Amino acid sequence: MKRLLYFSFLCKTVSSIRSPRSHDAALLFAVLPFSASATAAAASSTTGKHMFMAQYLIDSCGFNQEKATEASKLLKGIQSRQQPDSVLAFLKSYGFDDASVKKLVHCFPQCLLLDLEKALSPRLRAFEDLGLSPSDIIHLVRSNPSTIQMKHERIRSKIEFWQGLLSSKDALVKLIKRNRAILTFSIEKKIQPNLELLRECGLDGPKLAFVLRNCPLIVAQNADFLKSLICRAEDLGVPRTSGMFHCTLFALFNVSPEKFKMQMEFFQSFGWSEDDFVVAFQKCPTFLLASLTVLQRKMEFLINEAGYTSSYIAIRPVILTLSLERRLIPRHRILATLKSRGHCERDYKVTTYMMLSEAKFVEKYIILYKDRYPDLSELYASLNHTNGSDSGLQ
């Protein structure tokens, strides 16, 4: 209080005269216990720490000067090489290469402050216990460094939640490999509310498992997006009570309104009406997941080579979900070969032989004729080998 009174008196004194005198400044520094040398020393110390860590990041992690200076501001607690050296050595012994280390430190500089035994090692061990290999973990951390920021207790609780939801450790491992950000989403704020919304739509048990297995990020969206997706499905004539509602949500999540319109126009070029397209979508929403290029190749093959009309395909859209190279072409050519030799004379519908399981098809059309036509087996194998790339959806 006394210091403030002195300072107020001094300000009045200085403002009352035209120009300050040298002894005014002396009085100011005498009244206020200010040490320029102490402040300069403190600033120099802080700058020195920043310079030390900036240079360390340049030398040890390959940072440029700008990024090193920026990152060093978050590492004020480091005063020697011992702590960061131990973290870098641990990461490299685990299998992280220089590029992975650089990316991790750039995204999360504070990882250099982590205690190896109490923080870093347990976090990686949580993923190991799930069944991820070290290389899987490295890819996970490299693609999403925020996973290493979570406390290991939090990682474990999220792993347990997803594992319970999917009812399979293997399914969770596949999910994490495909969607490496999945463990970073808030269970309480985002995932749980979206799950409740899906359950209100009748999605539970196998149907919910289907959505989560094929489209897990659907429950990581904001609530408004998910509600708009549900409205789109209902506007297209697929009510919540429909057995295809879960497949419809899955398809619409991957097909934007713009792409949906483009695909409608594409099928109209083959003679479908708008109603034909919508009805086909209601029957089998997932046929729209293929690209226009793949759909065009399938339509041209089924019409020009297999001899089916566009209208026939429109009421059997499930055909368009089958792989062109692995199923449509090989099976059609086997049947065409048998017909040319006097077998399978009656007009087989495409769904009759295309929808059979692989074992059933081989039994009915290859093994049955193997004594008379041993070349069929070789032909079928060569067709599958020649057309090995899968351009469609199984």
Image (spheres, grey):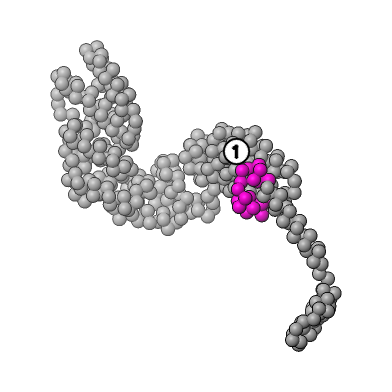
Residue 150 percent coordinates (x, y): 61, 47
Image: 171 above or below 237 = above
Q: Is residue 39 found inside the magenta-colored segment of the image? A: no
Q: Position of residue 243 (x, y in %)?
A: 33, 45
Q: Is residue 259 left or right of residue 332?
A: right
Q: Which residue is mark 1?
A: 98
Q: Give the side of residue 357 with respect to residue 186, left or right.
A: left
State which quarter of the image contains the C terminus.
top left
Q: Is residue 92 above or below residue 201?
A: above
Front one among 128 and 12: 12
Q: Quadrant of the N terminus?
A: bottom right
Say which element carries label 1: helix
Q: Residue at x 46, y 49 (%)?
A: 219
Q: Is residue 71 magenta?
A: yes
Tell me, yes or no, if residue 148 can be seen here. Answer: no
Coordinates of residue 192 in the picture (x, y in percent): 50, 51
* Magenta residues (range): 56-75
Query: Which secondary structure is most common in the magenta stretch?
Result: helix
Residue most extreme to the right: 30
